[in-house]
Every structure is written in structure tokens, then in C-alpha cells.
Amino acid sequence: DAKTTQPNSMESNEEEPVHLPCNHSTISGTDYIHWYRQLPSQGPEYVIHGLTSNVNNRMASLAIAEDRKSSTLILHRATLRDAAVYYCILRVGSNQGGKLIFGQGTELSVKP
Amino acid sequence: NAGVMQNPRHLVRRRGQEARLRCSPMKGHSHVYWYRQLPEEGLKFMVYLQKENIIDESGMPKERFSAEFPKEGPSILRIQQVVRGDSAAYFCASSPRPGTGPTGELFFGEGSRLTVL
């Protein structure tokens, strides 16, 4: 599995946008970029995924660089409930299933 | 539609005892994954199963650990002769048959927290 690099931690203020970066310089053409998050004492949950184009859903937006070597997860207005560890994961084939390999992720803290 | 159900949520065992963790996947899901999360560490893949078949067990410790997903009933992760280092949160996830879901998303349970005294 191709490797991703994320900052260990980030801080944000409540109600402000948050941009969580992810580098994946060894990404291949068939790798999808998936994001999951893990709230304290809970299992991970899916956030968003994309291949080449930017994506939006009710939880977040995903901005993918033109060369696909990096991406950014955008939370438009952080709330206290968004405090979690965010994982950026590369996956071959969006719906092909199979295991996910989690890295260390970025621990996001949100200040009131 | 109930989510992935794991039980027990908390389990305490003494060294040398056996631990059995159960996972019921979401309705319609035929694939199950087990992950372990040691205190203050990330999630580590253990095993990937479909009913009556182990697809990938590359993350399973060579001894004392086993997993099954029978035709009927939940998936079971079994740890024999537990040691203190087995204390961790064990998460189960499920997915539909690959290629059938819209996103390839894995749905995780709340986890089972094992404490070995």
C-alpha cells in the first residue's frame, strides 16, 4: 500500500474552517484517497473519498492536487464534536473492498 | 438498520485465560475485518474474513490468536492464554461484497476493550 504523510496534530478554533493536509507522493493512478476519522473512545468512521476531482459531502470537502501527490480535507466550520484523529488512506479501486491500512493520522483539537 | 455490533464492550481477563470477542456485521454485509488498537497507538489490521473463509490474515500474531466467521452467527476473535500485552481495544468492521458498495466504505463497531490483569 502506498504511504501517506500527515502532521501529528493540529489545532483549530470553533466555527472556523480547518484544512487537514496529506502527502501521498507515491500514489498510483488507480489509488483512491479515503479519509476516516476516529472520535475519542469510538470506532473509525468514513468521512469522504475521491480520485481526481474535488469532492463535497455533508461532512467535509476533499481538495485533490492536480498531480494527485497531495490532498486536503476541509471542515468548513469546526465544531467541538469534530475533535478526532483524522486518517488519510490510499486505496486501490474505490469500491473494491479489502483492508484499510491506517497510519498515525492527525489529531485535531478544537478550541471553544 | 443496526450498525456493526460488538460484544462484550469491556472484558477483563487474568493472564492465561481465554478471551472471545464477537462481531455481528451490518445487515447484508458478508465481509468482516478485525483491527487492534494498543493504548496511545494507531489501528493495526489483523484479519479479513468472509463467511467460512479467511481472506487475509497477514496481521494476525502467529500464536494464540484465531478468527472465524461461520455461515451462521457472528464473527469471533479468539485469544488464548492472554498476556498483559494483549490489553487493547479490538475493533471490528464490515463491508458488503467488494465491488457492490458505492464507496468501498468500511463500517466500524464501537470496539471491545480487553484488559488483562
Image (spheres, rainbow, N blue to C red):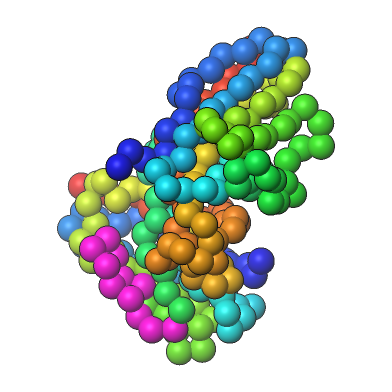
- Residue B98 on image: x %, y %: 53, 61
Q: Is residue B59 left or right of residue A83?
A: right
* Count of numbered circles in the view: 0
Q: Residue sitting at 73 percent across and 21 percent down? A: B80
Which stretch appears magenta?
A52-62
Q: Is residue A17 visible?
A: no
Residue at the image point whose x is 22% and y is 52% from the top: A79
Q: Residue at x 70, y 12 (%)?
A: B17
Residue pushed farthest left? A15
Q: Quadrant of residue B82?
A: top right
Question: Going by the image, does A79 lie left or right of A46?
Answer: left
Q: Is B114 or A24 nearer to us in this picture? A: B114
In the depicted structure, whether residue B15 falls above or below residue A106 = above
x then y, percent, for residue A51: 46, 79
Quadrant of the frame with the N terminus of chain B = top left
User: Is there any visible trace of residue A92 in the rendered image?
Assistant: yes
Question: Image quadrant of residue A71?
Answer: bottom left
- Which is nearer the eye, A58 or A17? A58
Q: Which residue is nearer to you in this view: A96 or B110?
A: A96
Q: Is residue A56 magenta?
A: yes
Can you name the residue that lies furthest to the right here? Answer: B62
Q: Residue shown at 64%/19% (left/top)?
A: B19
Q: Main secondary structure of the magenta part?
A: loop
Q: Is residue B58 left or right of residue A32?
A: right
Which quarter of the picture shows residue A10? Answer: bottom left
